[in-house]
Image: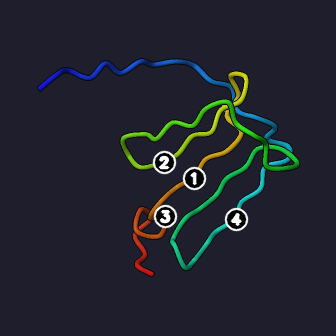
Amino acid sequence: MGSVEIKERELRIGDVNQLWFEYDRQTDILYINFGYDIEEADEALLTENNVVVRIKEGRVVSLTVFDFMKRIGFET
């Protein structure tokens, strides 16, 4: 089995003055967006703890947190 190289990098958070959340109870997904609108991303990364980080020009424009209620100790 081959080894996996994990690269660390620093990213900036988008516009925190326009932070907004949306929770989808049916799928137990929390969407966190930084900015006025949903921005197109240059790339999306899936972290080892099942969070999608969407990035545009070195800025995090949104996070998608799967199984949110389970993570905070509530079952839906």
- Answer few, some or many: residues within 10 Å of disc 3's Cα (few below 14, many 20 plus, some between 14 and 19): many
The answer to whether 71 is drawn above or below residue 2 in the figure is below
Residue position for label 4: 22
Residue position for label 3: 68
Mark 3 or 2 closer to N-term?
A: 2
Which residue is painted at 16% across and 22% down in the image? 2
- Answer few, some or many: residues within 10 Å of disc 4's Cα (few below 14, many 20 plus, some between 14 and 19): few
**Disc 4 marks which amino acid?**
Glu
Which residue is painted at 70% across and 65% down in the image? 22
* Kind of element beneath mark 2: strand
**Disc 1 marks which amino acid?**
Thr
The answer to whether 59 is drawn above or below residue 38 in the figure is above
Mark 1 or 4 closer to N-term?
A: 4
Residue 4 position in % (x across, y down):
26, 23
Spatial separation of the CA atoms under disc 4 and disc 3: 12 Å
Residue position for label 2: 51
| Mark toward the viewer: 3 or 2 | 2
Which residue is painted at 52% across and 55% down in the image? 65
Residue position for label 1: 64
Residue 31 position in % (x across, y down):
64, 57
Residue 38 position in % (x across, y down):
79, 49
- Answer few, some or many: residues within 10 Å of disc 1's Cα (few below 14, many 20 plus, some between 14 and 19): many
For the N terminus, the quadrant is top left
**Disc 2 marks which amino acid?**
Val
Q: Which mark is residue 12?
A: none
Spatial separation of the CA atoms under disc 4 and disc 2: 15 Å
- Answer few, some or many: residues within 10 Å of disc 2's Cα (few below 14, many 20 plus, some between 14 and 19): some
Spatial separation of the CA atoms under disc 1 and disc 4: 10 Å
The answer to whether 60 is drawn above or below residue 52 in the figure is above
